[in-house]
Amino acid sequence: MGELEEKETPQTETTATQETLDEPKETDKMLDKKDEAKEKTPSPQSSKPATPNAGKKSPTPQAEQQPTEAKSGEEIIDIPAENGSKSNGGAAGDSEEKKISKEEREVKPKKIPIGGLKLPGFFMKNKPKAEGDGAEGELLEKDKEQEQDEEKGANGDAAAKAEEAQKPRAGLGQRLRNFFVRKPAAEKDQKEQEKKQLSNGDADAKSEATAEAAPAEDGDVPTKRGLLNAIKLPIANMLPKKKSGDDVELGLGKAGLASMETLDDSLKDQDTVDRAPLKSNGADELKSELKDEKLAAEQKLAAEEEERERPVSLWCRLRGYKCSVDDALIVFGILLFLLLLGVIGYVLTHETLTSPPLREGRYISAVTSCGMVEGVKEDGAFAFRGIPYAKAPLDELRWQPAQLIDNIEDCWNGTLQTHNGSTVCTQRLGNGTTIGEENCLYLDVVTPHVRYTNPLPVVVLIGAESLVGPSPGILRPSARYSRSHDVIFVRPNFRLGVFGFLALDALTKDANPRSSGNYALSDIIAVLKWIQLNIVHFGGDAKSVTLLGHRAGATLVSALVTSKQLDGLYTRAWASSASAVYPGKALQESERMNTNLMATLDCQDAACLREASSEKLWAATPDTWFNFPVDLPKQQEQTNASRHEWLVLDGVILQQHPTESWKQATAAAATAVGSSQSQKPKLVMGATAHEAHTPKLRELHANWTAEEVREYLQASQLGAMGLTDEIIKRYNATNYAALVAIITDIRTVCPLIANVRLQPSVPMYVVTQGEGEDQLATVDADVQAILGRYEPHTVEQRRFVSAMQQLFYYYVSHGTVQSVDSRRRFIIVGQDAVGQLDHEHCNYWIDKDIVPRYARTD
């Protein structure tokens, strides 16, 4: 550290008694006035004994120049240097000592410089310094400057100034270098510094030379930071480290050796100078105090280390963790993902355990009462097409009620492949051609699952445009909708025309019980019985069976639900665009009206009829049995009494007219419950607003104008009754859509409403949402929407499809129709389903005796 000199003068009484400290000057002032110090004579200073509490280095700059310009009367204290030689006054300056007389020198006892001890409070408060820029380093740098001044003389001033000018740049460079330098952990660094400084402080108390020789530990270059930490904490590294309160009090911080210059830099305010009284024997007390403080600090460090090494429980760590919103969202997402995986795994496992395995990835087997059948995977569901449900109606079984397969000889061996379906029953198309076979009593099953758990509702599709064909028309099962709505579709074939409805006296005598006709109804009853026995093996619920009939199929359904033979075989029914004319003739009357067919075939008994081919039978059928009016009532149109009716009151299936059955059912429900309005409907009827539209009618005029509509109305029975102007005003009949609406109300909608009024628990809907150029709600619009074959092109049409599906599938699952209450049983289905009291035009047609006189007959 070099030799530290103090100028002493004989103590006066004033200085001896007061023993005060001179106020230090700032270091910067000392460094700036080095040149002036060499020329000036130092003023006498009062000598200050070297005590731990009061020793101070002379603040005047002349003290530093004393070795070369010493005068008489000055006293020099020699302090051994680090290498054993005297700095400033040692071997290097012997020649200068000889110039001073011995009388003028008085050697004083060696004193401990105040900068050689690390005392509490001697640290830098006001100036934050970078590492390696503490008080010890500053003392060493200033001592080196003094040695350079002694060796270079007058040239030393310039060198000192140059070094002093470089100091700020060196500090800035070190700060910039520390920008990307990894510093040791705060706790570990503090612990090591405290231990080192305590040991250094003890050594300083024991020996001045040891204290001067101890290098400052703060100047160590810290280890480098990693790239990631350098990016994350660049600003934190630029800030100076804040010392803790314990380091300040114990003097264990990075202040190092406190010299007079350091104290002058830190104590800018002269009023804050420590003026503690001097003590002659303070060194011994200081040693004991430092030992006690060191012991206390070591104990505190050991306690902190033990506290850090103590294991912390997981619960304490979780409680101490501060969860942000992002962390909560991440945890929630992970839990949701795990839950989804669990649900998917459960579903897949459940499906695997309850469903039979697929053969070749697409074929699946199911059990029936007559043997195994194999279906095929189709559009996410499983289709079994062509399963026999009754014996073939051939030979002796022609014109016999359907008979279930109850004999093993009529079953099949092994597994029956039901992949491609079967041919339809023999029928007559609209162009007069016939297709199909008599051996046609088969059905198709489309199911989303083949399992025994969670049985699904069953929908039986009964479709036919007329009772002679074609069938099933558009009413075909949808595999996609079976899967998406979780229902099972069953579509059976049933006999049509003369094979399904012929009533003759010869056939009645050959049957047991004595009856004929309505063979198609017996086919549907056999289908429902097969469903009760076998649908469970296809994943269906035999206690939830809905009949869906369309057009002539709806006529069969609405008539069949009045039969007692259906008790327990179905749950509910839905009839779309059915005929309102039901059989009203007795069996004998129907048999008498059909005798001309036997005359055409030249047959006298049932055996002759059974030997006739299907082609002969179709050719012998009168044309009047096929023609049904779909236009405005004509003046020459036959009344209902002279019209041919395929359905008959056979006395077995249909024992009475449906009207009588509805009245009895209504009275029984009112007696059982107290109010018929509280009963769930077992039948829903519906139609479309433009059902009477046909291409033939539309092509009569390229563009139906108001005048053309008037002329067409005037030529009909309505014009003959003088109702043309009133009808045009009521319907605003100026285009083709209005004309079709008039025909539909007369033929279908209003006759059905007349029947619905007899059944208080039966709701009815009318579809009004149009499509195409004329915006017509055609006869198939509702069923196409239910089965997903309606192609919407506008927002209104999409809403109509959604409303129609909601009405039907909610009814299938729950047995009730939404948007319906006891007072508003009539539903208009446009883009939405809206309940209303009644149809506004039907009362007019009923009052004019147009309805139900001219209702459509299948």
Image (spheres, helix red, strand yellow):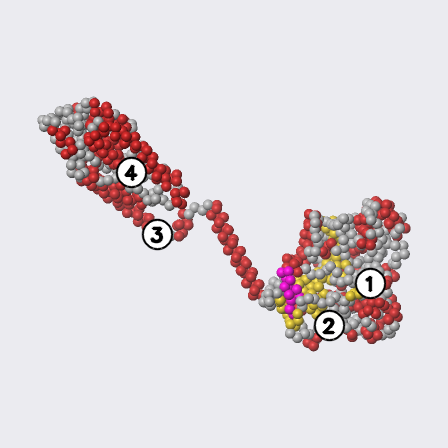
Q: Secondary structure at mark 2?
A: loop
Query: In this picture, which residue range is highlighted in magenta?
Result: 373-384
- Report how far apart the C-alphas of labels 3 and 4 lie in the structure: 36 Å
Circle 3 sits in a helix, a strand or a loop, which is it?
Answer: loop
- The reply to whether the C-beta atoms of the residues labelled 3 and 2 are less than 8 Å apart is no
Snapshot quadrant of residue 607: bottom right
Identify the residue position indicated by label 1 in the image: 432
731 magenta-colored? no
Amino acid type shown at disc 4: Gly
Query: Which residue lies under the disc numbered 2?
Result: 391
- Quarter of the image with the C terminus is bottom right
**Magenta span includes 374:** yes
Residue to which mark 4 is pinned: 132
In the image, is residue 162 above or below residue 538?
above
Name the residue at 23% across, 29% down: 156
Q: The residue tagged with tag 4: helix, strand or loop?
A: loop
Disc 2 to disc 1: CB gap under 8 Å = no
What's the residue type where badge 2 is placed? Lys
Name the residue nearer the viewer: 210 or 356: 210
Point out the tag, 3 or 2, that comes first from the N-terminus: 3
Q: Quadrant of the N terminus?
A: top left
Say which label, 2 or 1, has the lower sequence index: 2
- Measure the alpha-carbon separation of dots 1 and 3: 95 Å
Q: Give residue 69's quadrant in the image.
A: top left
Residue type for callout 1: Gly
